[in-house]
Amino acid sequence: MAPESFQILTFYLGSEEYALPLVQAKEILGQVPITLLPNAPKHVVGLLNLRGEILPVFDLRRLFRLQSPPRQGVQECVLVAETQGDPFGLCVDGVHQVLTLSVDRIDPPSEALKARSAAISGLAKDGNRLIILLDLANLFSLDDPFQNEIEALATTSRHRRDA
């Protein structure tokens, strides 16, 4: 019997490759107009009107405090994702590919890595590549003093969508 497998969507932040479960990725947008929010945390880019639904947009590079420059020749895009019924946008340097991986090619994060970031659910090995798997449910629990405001943005968006 073949090991269990699942699909991930890989994307770049600088020279590093990250991924999220494909079922959480909703769509990929090119450059889109984003309304800036005054006094927002540095990783909150603003709001996006996606076919009448207002979504918060976050910059993962800022959230993770990455110093690496964007990849050369790659256009930044917005990856629309969803967790726990709440859609949001993630600014990434570029989307790479959909991969099907067996669970035996994924290592859980070490205790040291887990202690540094609850947003990492595992490390995937694909040949010589190492891909950081994100846990979107824990993405914004990174000791963020603005967590209440972010949750309020998502709730506002959900209420407008349900109305």
Image (cartoon, helix red, strand yellow):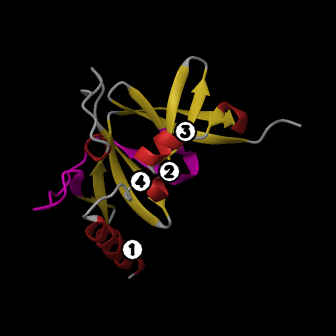
Q: Residue furthest left?
A: 38
For badge 4, the amino acid type reads Leu
Instruction: Work out how far the residue at label 4 is from the one at label 3, CA to CA, in angstroms.
Output: 17 Å
Nearest to viewer (mark 3 / mark 1): 3
For badge 3, the amino acid type reads Ser
Residue 132 placement (x, y as % from top left)? 49, 36
Secondary structure category for the residue under label 4: loop
Query: In this figure, which residue is indicated by the disc labeled 4?
Result: 139
| For residue 72, above or below residue 5 | above
Residue closest to the eye, 34 or 20? 20
Residue 129 placement (x, y as % from top left)? 53, 21
For badge 1, the amino acid type reads Arg
Instruction: Work out how far the residue at label 4 is from the one at label 1, CA to CA, in angstroms.
Output: 18 Å
Query: In this figure, which residue is indicated by the disc labeled 2?
Result: 135
Nearest to viewer (mark 1 / mark 2): 2
Are discs 4 and 2 less than 8 Å apart at CB? yes
Q: Earlier in the sequence, mark 4 or mark 1?
A: 4
Query: In this figure, which residue is indicated by the disc labeled 1?
Result: 158
Query: In this figure, which residue is indicated by the disc labeled 3?
Result: 110
Secondary structure category for the residue under label 3: loop
At 35% from the left and 69% from the top, the residue drawn is 154
